Amino acid sequence: MIKLKTELPGPRSKALDAERKKYVPRGVASYTHIYVVKAHGAELEDVDGNRLLDFAAGIAVTNVGHAPERIVRAVQEQASRFLHASINVTPYEGYVRLSERLNRVTPDPFPKKTLLVNSGAEAVENAIKIARAATGRTAVVCFEHAYHGRPHMAMTLTSHALPYKVGFGPYCPDVYRAPFPYLYRWPGTGEKGGEEDFVAEECFRQFEDMVAIDIDASQVAAVIIEPVQGEGGFLPAPVKFLKKLQAFCRENGIVFIADEVQTGFGRTGTLLACERLGAEPDIVTMGKGLGAGMPISAVTGRADIMDAVGVGGIGGTYAGNPLSCASALEVLDMFEDGSLLKCARAMEEPLRKRLLSFKDKYEFIGNVQGIGTMQAMEIVKSRATKEPDWEAAWKILTHCYKRGLVILSAGTYDSIVRMLMPLTIEPEQVEEGLDVLETALQALKT
Ligand code: PMP
């Protein structure tokens, strides 16, 4: 329950923020200026004693809630034994156990192997290296509106020039971009939708053309796609499109990579989005929700592809840190009996319904999109032109956080309001948050 003792941000948060401005570069952005001291379930407590509701989950990380007891215990237990040894020096069981579990839970019929690293972007960087080593080719195809991270290859694959790319060039060579089947913004699609098959066909045709004209399939090492674009604004790729891409990759010896860093671990109602969308990628990258807040990410893929890299070619000092492995193993245990996924699936319909009811009332909501608990609203200047309205989206976020609801935007135009609450959130807390969100929508209307 939201309980505010001060205006937000409160005096202590403000004081810390003043220090932060002195010590931390401005390039590290924050959605809010509220400094957290505690977090539990779907609630955050700040340095001024305010209790806030969390619809951000640390950007899709605390899917199992903030600091569940069993995760804290597993990490403490590991910490009491050893903090670090490095897989590259003296290996440890947690790395092996977690790899084995991830090989089992990722959808595809092949024997698999897993590389553990530290962040989503690091997983993406490694997936591309592995695909290049396995194919002996260099070209990589990614998609418009994609987000894959900030290091150089991941940044190159990312579609959003500002703030992620401008000034950081040159980018990595041999990266090509194809259109993403963005249903709402695909030219010629109406407000009613229902054009999924048409967009899937047309988008795939453009992909095939681009590959044939600009690269030639024989030169392509990998195609990397988010099955549901996260930072792009919760855009699910149509099943038909994913199936065609997958078939194209298989026919042409191309490694098909699904970046599930944001979609992973229950967000779409299945453990991974590929399961729900019927895709069987050669490699899956995972991060965020895997560690429940402990930094860890994974590249799980076909064993023959993963083994293409020579000994010592992949890894890193902290890769698959033992504390993070302990946390991730506990996360997988928490998902094992299916009850968390059941919660996620139970949340989908009411959440979507409420957002659609907002769309009925407020003209500036151009579209409600997403899958599972990944639901989002496109904020537009006009439904006729679909012109994105990032200023209005920011007004909504600011209004919400000042009233104790932490909620994020997304999208190439930063005009999409997205829901990323922990999957363990109580239905009443969802309603409470959506009530706050509605006051923001009302305020914008007046
Ligand atoms: N891939 C996707 C799909 C993501 O959503 C993100 C993070 N938003 C990343 C990669 C990068 O992850 P990280 O910030 O952990 O490097």
Image (tube, rainbow, N blue to C red):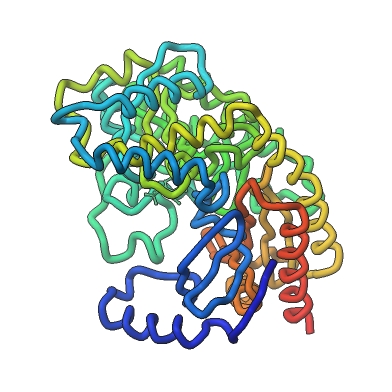
Left or right, 438 with reference to 223: right
User: Where is 215 relative to 403, above or below?
Assistant: above
Residue 134 on image: x %, y %: 28, 20
Quarter of the rendering containing residue 202 = top right
Front residue of 346/143: it is 346
- Identified at 84% across, 60% down, the residue is 357
Q: Which quadrant is the N terminus positioned in?
A: bottom right
Quarter of the figure with residue 378 = bottom right
Report the front residue among 396 and 164.
Answer: 396
Q: In this view, does 44 lie above or below 314?
A: below
From the viewer's perspective, is residue 206 above or below residue 336?
below
Quarter of the figure with the C terminus: bottom right
- Which residue is at 30% across, 24% downward? 93
Residue at 57% across, 44% down: 64
Residue 409 on image: x %, y %: 57, 63
Give the image location of residue 254, x and y in percent: 39, 22
Direction from residue 173 to residue 68 in the image, left or right: right
In the image, 419 versus 146, the foreground residue is 419
Classify residue 135 by image quadrant: top left
Give the number of marks.
Answer: 0
Residue located at (43% from left, 52% from top): 159
| Residue 125 in view, yes or no | no
Q: Is residue 230 visible?
A: yes
Q: Where is residue 234 in the image (x, y as percent from the top left)?
A: 60, 49
| Relative vertical location of residue 199 with respect to residue 299 in this rendering, above or below | below
